[in-house]
Amino acid sequence: MIRSLLIANRGEIARRIIRTARRLGVRTVAVHSDVDAGLPFVTEADAAICIGSAAARDSYLRQDRILAAAREAGAEAIHPGYGFLSENADFAEAVAAARLVWVGAPPAAIRAMGLKDAAKARMLAAGVPVTPGYMGEDQSPDRLRREAGATGYPVLIKAVAGGGGKGMRRVDVEDAFDEALASCRREAAAAFGDERVLIEKYILSPRHVEVQVFGDRHGNVVHLFERDCSLQRRHQKVIEEAPAPGIDAQTRAAVCEAAVRAAQAVGYVGAGTIEFIADASEGLRADRIWFMEMNTRLQVEHPVTEAITGQDLVEWQLRVASGEPLPLRQDELAIDGWAMEARLYAENPATGFLPSTGPLDHLRLPAGIRVDSGVEQGDAVTPFYDPMIAKLVVHASGRGEAAARLAAAARAVEVWPVRTNAGFLARAAADPDFVAGRVDTGFIERRAAALVPGAEPSEAVLQAAAAALLPAGPDDPWTALAGFRANADPRVEVAVEIAGTLHVVEVPHPPQPSAARVRGLADGGRVLFLDGVAWDFGPPRADRVSGSGQAGDGAILAPMPGRVIAVAVEEGGRVTKGQRLVVIEAMKMEQALVAPFDGTVVALKVTEGDQVSESALLARVEASA
């Protein structure tokens, strides 16, 4: 077994590798940029070396500095994690040239699968079904247009060297082909330095099914069953699960055996994923699942495979890299239950999923499930790297239970002031179509209106925030008769400033139970968490409430808890600025509340003798036109 390991990556995957290495007695070395110096993966490693400044090109992509760090630390091997240099064949060869062990795919396999057209040609030769289309050398627009017509619209134009959703364009009609081709080539050239493309038949009801494969240096290759990664947004995976919903034994056998043939065709060693596209218009069928590409590394979603097989894939990687045979034969692997993973990102769904960066002043992630996270409370999300906060992974006996657990886990997330997609994940996992397994890669786009929480607080949020502002304790004299009026239901009206806007909320007395959680902040503010969404709130600010107890929108608020001893106006009556409206008495002190401007009393909420709470709405004045 390898005795010391340098991890050429950061964040949650670095922590995940450290966890397994420590269990196996392997010494770990972290490399990090200067802005990552205080993150958990750095402090948890046995040794750490700074390799540059924040930009990845000056640190995590610097092959020379990583190799120098390995020599300095005396590491025997390098694990690249995923992303960064994990699928860089030149780096894999440089590691071997430095007489270090590369914990990854052979460079030849990386190159063979790195270009989509060459990979598909190799798969055809190996008897692996590939998506209908064109992947020839003739890249002239005329030839590509003719091949698109022969394939049949709609088609997908894809960069030969593409990945991560870049360099892809859907074309529905021939008239739109030339413009889409030019746009795709520009993006491919900018992202990959290669403008070549291929043409594929666009699948109208696509499912993204992938198979985890593993090979060793002794010629053994096995699969660890399939995952479904169809829940995507802009070609980026959001929720992954294993096994794939709706797949029967015959289809599973066909796709998994094809994946093993694909790995064998390139002499694969280590962890890899064979990705397939399925036409699910009539369910998953073996004759409608085609090879798409291979990821020659560990995948972000590998925990769901670990959950259903009971295997540690990082341990398998280290053992295979050490020259050992695969830990298990194919007939020793089986599926146990159902697993799902959701990617918790620092992004704001209400603003089109724009990234949200900043300090993690408050961070609580759900208990009772597997959580792979690269940060802790007090850390920060920076603009330099992928904004993933954590992966939420659940395992259950069946799919329905797994979906319910995932939705509950997302609802339990508490992050502030950074915004997250937790509310979006909770809604997606609880969506009836998702729960029923009716998903494809267009699911999120079709259901966006229902999945993205509104930018304005719901009535449940307002009620919970208002209830939190009521004076605490059953012995409080001002809430004992809160909202009491003869021949009327008890009620309390509270002015709540939430997300910068003032709301007047009528709260039943006593308040109704709520699933919301209210947390106090170091600066005296409060945050309410409900269904994965965070709302900052508090009593109306001084600049929103004048000395007369008037809020900026004409609401007359009680400046203190007390008893109404006089009401000097009637609803509908005209008033002038400074005119006395209501008088409150508390602790032998009287406070007269006056009109803030000329206008009309459009609402009068109290009568003489009423007991009121602090910030309760007493009246509302509408300014004269």
Image (cartoon, rainbow, N blue to C red):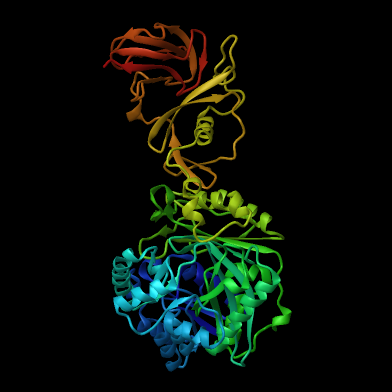
Tell me residue 513's x, y (percent): 62, 33
Tell me residue 43's x, y (percent): 48, 69
Which of the pair 202/240 is nearer the observer?
Answer: 202
Which of the pair 22/126 is nearer the observer?
Answer: 126
Above or below, 486 against 154 in this view is above
Above or below, 324 against 399 in this view is below
Q: Quadrant of the C terminus?
A: top left
Residue 582 is drawn in which quadrant? top left
Which of the pair 168/537 is nearer the observer?
Answer: 168
- How many numbered tags mark residues here? 0
Q: Is residue 65 visible?
A: yes
**Residue lying at 37% horizontally and 63% vertically, measured from the top left:** 173
Above or below, 576 against 335 in this view is above
Q: Could you tell whether 542 is left or right of 471 in the image?
A: left
Q: Quadrant of the N terminus?
A: bottom right
Residue 576 is drawn in which quadrant? top left
Which of the pair 610/344 is nearer the observer?
Answer: 344
Tell me residue 19's x, y (percent): 58, 72
Q: Is residue 159 visible?
A: no
Q: Could you tell whether 608 is left or right of 327 in the image?
A: left
Tell me residue 556's x, y (percent): 39, 19
**Residue lying at 39% horizontally and 83% vertically, measured from the top left:** 136
Residue reaching furthest to the left: 625
